Structure formats: C-alpha cells, structure tokens
Amino acid sequence: MEKLSPAEQLLTFTRKMLLFAQAGEWEKLTELEKARLPLFNQVFAQGIAGNVELVREVLSIDEKTKSLAEAEMPVIQDELCKIKNSGKASMAYQAIQGFSSNNK
C-alpha cells in the first residue's frame, strides 16, 4: 500500500469527519479534526494557488459537516441541561439527606 500524500490524507480525514458527523460520532470527529489541523497547515502553508480544487472539495465537505454539527447543537445543549439539572437535583437531595441526618 502506497503512502498517501499530505493533500490526499487531508481529503481522506475530511471525508471521514463527514462520515462521523453523519453517524453522530462527535468525539471521533473532534479527535480527527485535531489530527487534521497539522495536515491542513502543511498542505496550505504555501497558499492555495496549487490546490484550488482541493480547497473547494474540503470546504464543500466541511460545510456539510458543519451543518450536521449545528443541527445537533440543540440536542447536545438539551442533554447538557439534563445533566446539569440532575446534578442540581442530586446536590439538593444530598443536602436534604445531610440536613435530616443532622437533625436526628
């Protein structure tokens, strides 16, 4: 198997990120995004002139990924609120337990 060029790796990572977004694999997407950043910088360090088609394809795929992430945000925010509220409920319950055991 031949080694992919940095530009090919960048495109592969970008496509995988879209697949992760489509599958709701947000942690994997984030990890891959971090791994992709150095490639992105390497490929475009000398500007985009020699990679116009690559830029267009990466931007197009990134837009789709971004749209999926934005659509997921209300769901994630709702989950975070539930976690936060369950934490508050747990703290309140523990406070009540502590109060009632101190007053025995």
Image: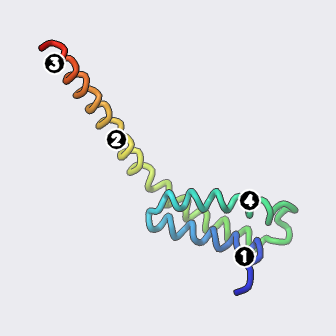
Q: Earlier in the sequence, mark 3 or mark 4?
A: 4
Q: CA distance from mark 4 to mark 1?
A: 14 Å
The answer to whether the residue labelled 3 contacts the one labelled 4, judged by CB atoms less than 8 Å apart, is no
Identify the residue under disc 3: 100
Q: Earlier in the sequence, mark 4 or mark 1?
A: 1
Taking the image as shown, residue 34 lies to the left or right of residue 94, namely right
Q: Nearer the viewer, residue 76 or 87?
A: 87
Identify the residue under disc 4: 38
Q: Residue at x 25, y 27 (%)?
A: 94
The numbered mark at residue 83 is 2
The quarter in which the C terminus is drawn is: top left
Q: Earlier in the sequence, mark 3 or mark 1?
A: 1
Q: Earlier in the sequence, mark 2 or mark 1?
A: 1
Q: Earlier in the sequence, mark 2 or mark 3?
A: 2
Crowd rating for badge 2 (residues with CA inside 10 Å; few <14, some 14–19, many 20+): few
Report which quarter residue 92 is drawn in: top left
Measured from the top left, where is residue 90 in percent x and y? 27, 32
Crowd rating for badge 1 (residues with CA inside 10 Å; few <14, some 14–19, many 20+): some
Residue lying at the far left of the rendered structure: 104
The numbered mark at residue 8 is 1
Q: CA distance from mark 3 to mark 4?
A: 56 Å
